[in-house]
Image (cartoon, grey):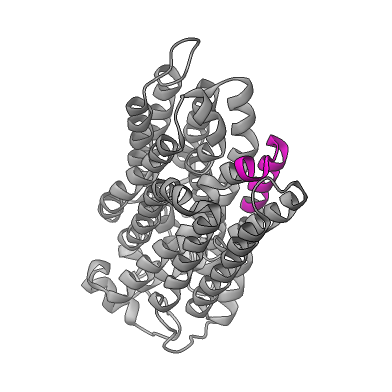
């Protein structure tokens, strides 16, 4: 797929190799702006709990609604992307998400004696998730269309890096905004980010005039398997289902950190806002660097599947260590606060580093023309986990406190190890 042979979908103007970096930039910005919402809002958990007068159970419900909305809508958005194209779906989704967040800023925020009810907050976040689910598959399909095999791992990892980057931005901004200016400002800033990204997508995002037929993408040595699987459809491909379900299992420890990491540091260790924000920002920043490195490294070595399996094992070990240390030290152990924060960062980074590699694997298995559907399958599992994980943590806390939470996260990471498919044989690229 040579960049110089492409022409724009609009106007017939040639768009060369350089334009693909604009496409990657749009994909990055789209994912970052929405990630600032679904990863950033949970970092305000302590202020949500106080401002909306909810307990841990209600907190888990409202945070889970974001994930439920995304999980329910991902596959329909992915199928629509393969039918309508990246541009239409991304513009529609970003614009609608910005409108939903703006509506929340106007109507679903505590003001004086008025506190919105739990159902109103939950439905608002559910709507944001339903609309924002459009971003993942459409931006990923656009990147797959403009980049060749041998560089797609890096490109997709850079795009996936937008998730922790946007989450890190949210972790730095949103708790301070919530504590000083209220949730109207939180939702308003998030709406602005989505609207600005939609403007960039309008200017730059176009599909190549023709996709690469035959999709010579190779996965661990498979020459034309992507074409065969694309013809059959990813919904009928057991390898796609295995990767997608493995993604869901390995997302549990990652999302346990993202949704309740701030609560753990605050309640278990009495950490201050500065340490909490720095810890969560470090998780997102470390994950961003790890994703870029892993994409480039697996492109060179052709070992995506082996890397995914290794990440599941390392993550399981780190969360098992966090469970043991938490159990031995006990709560309110001030001398261990820094150690707990470091373990949260290490575990969170390990549980996030594999994302770009796994989604590249999904898109490669399906082929470029069906990449929207395959990526949506992976995201459906990932965000279904985002719905279930914060719902499961409060009961686990009631039964066994934080050591049990981290132990269950470790087991889920270990489950991904046999679920991810093994490498059949390695591919080589020019």
Left or right: residue 420 versus residue 355 is left
The extreme right residue here reads 335
The relative height of residue 193 versus residue 154 in the rendered view (above or below) is: above
> Does residue 385 show up magenta in the picture?
no
Percent of width and height locating residue 282: 68, 50
Name the residue: 45% across, 47% down. Answer: 398
For the record, the magenta segment spans 265-283
Name the residue: 38% across, 85% down. Answer: 223
Report whether residue 11 is seen.
no
Left or right: residue 400 versus residue 323 is left
Report whether residue 236 is seen.
yes
Most foreground residue, 224 or 258 = 258
Name the residue: 55% across, 29% down. Answer: 47
The relative height of residue 35 versus residue 177 in the rendered view (above or below) is: below
The extreme top residue here reads 113
Most foreground residue, 239 or 24 = 239
Percent of width and height locating residue 304: 50, 76
Left or right: residue 59 versus residue 341 is left
The extreme bottom residue here reads 425
Q: Where is the C terminus found, in terms of image quarters? A: bottom right
Name the residue: 39% across, 79% down. Answer: 421
Percent of width and height locating residue 149: 48, 73
Q: Where is the N terminus found, in terms of image quarters? A: bottom left
Q: Main secondary structure of the magenta part?
A: helix
> Does residue 277 show up magenta in the picture?
yes
Most foreground residue, 109 or 53 = 53
Dividing the picture into quadrants, the one containing residue 415 is bottom left
Count of residue discs: 0
Percent of width and height locating residue 154: 56, 66
């Amino acid at each position: 797929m040579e960049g110089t042979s492409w022409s724009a979908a609009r106007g017939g103007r040639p768009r060369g190799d350089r334009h693909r970096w604009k496409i990657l930039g749009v994909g990055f910005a789209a994912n970052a702006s929405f990630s600032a919402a679904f990863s950033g809002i949970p970092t305000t958990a302590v202020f949500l709990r106080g401002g909306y007068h909810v307990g841990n159970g209600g907190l888990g419900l409202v945070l889970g609604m974001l994930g439920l909305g995304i999980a329910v809508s991902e596959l329909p958005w992915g199928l629509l992307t393969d039918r309508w194209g990246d541009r239409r779906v991304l513009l529609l989704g970003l614009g609608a998400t910005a409108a939903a967040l703006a509506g929340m800023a106007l109507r679903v925020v505590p003001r004086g004696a008025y506190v919105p009810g739990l159902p109103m907050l939950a439905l608002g976040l559910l709507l944001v998730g339903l609309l924002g689910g459009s971003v993942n598959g459409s931006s990923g399909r656009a990147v797959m269309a403009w980049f060749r095999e041998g560089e797609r791992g890096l490109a997709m990892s850079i795009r996936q890096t937008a998730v922790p980057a946007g989450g890190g931005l949210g972790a730095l901004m949103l708790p301070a905004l919530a504590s000083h200016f209220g949730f109207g400002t939180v939702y308003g800033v998030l709406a602005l980010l989505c609207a600005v990204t939609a403007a960039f997508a309008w200017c730059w995002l176009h599909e190549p005039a023709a996709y690469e037929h035959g999709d010579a993408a190779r996965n661990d040595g498979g020459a034309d398997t992507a074409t065969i699987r694309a013809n059959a459809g990813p919904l009928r491909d057991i390898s796609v289902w295995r990767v997608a379900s493995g993604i869901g299992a390995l997302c549990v420890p990652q999302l346990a950190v993202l949704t309740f990491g701030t609560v753990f540091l605050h309640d278990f260790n009495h950490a201050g806002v500065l340490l909490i924000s720095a810890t969560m920002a470090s998780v997102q920043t470390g994950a961003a660097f790890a994703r870029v490195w892993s994409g480039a490294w697996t492109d060179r070595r052709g070992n995506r599947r082996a890397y995914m399996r290794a990440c599941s094992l390392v993550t399981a070990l780190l969360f098992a260590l966090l469970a043991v240390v938490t159990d031995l030290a006990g709560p309110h152990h001030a001398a261990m606060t820094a150690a707990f924060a470091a373990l949260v960062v290490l575990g969170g980074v390990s549980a996030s580093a594999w994302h770009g590699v796994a989604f590249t694997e999904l898109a490669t298995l399906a082929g470029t023309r069906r990449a929207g559907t395959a990526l949506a399958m992976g995201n459906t599992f990932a965000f279904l986990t985002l719905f279930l994980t914060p719902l499961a943590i409060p009961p686990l806390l009631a039964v066994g406190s934080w050591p049990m939470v981290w132990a269950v996260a470790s087991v889920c990471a270990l489950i991904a190890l046999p679920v991810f498919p093994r490498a059949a044989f390695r591919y080589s690229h020019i």
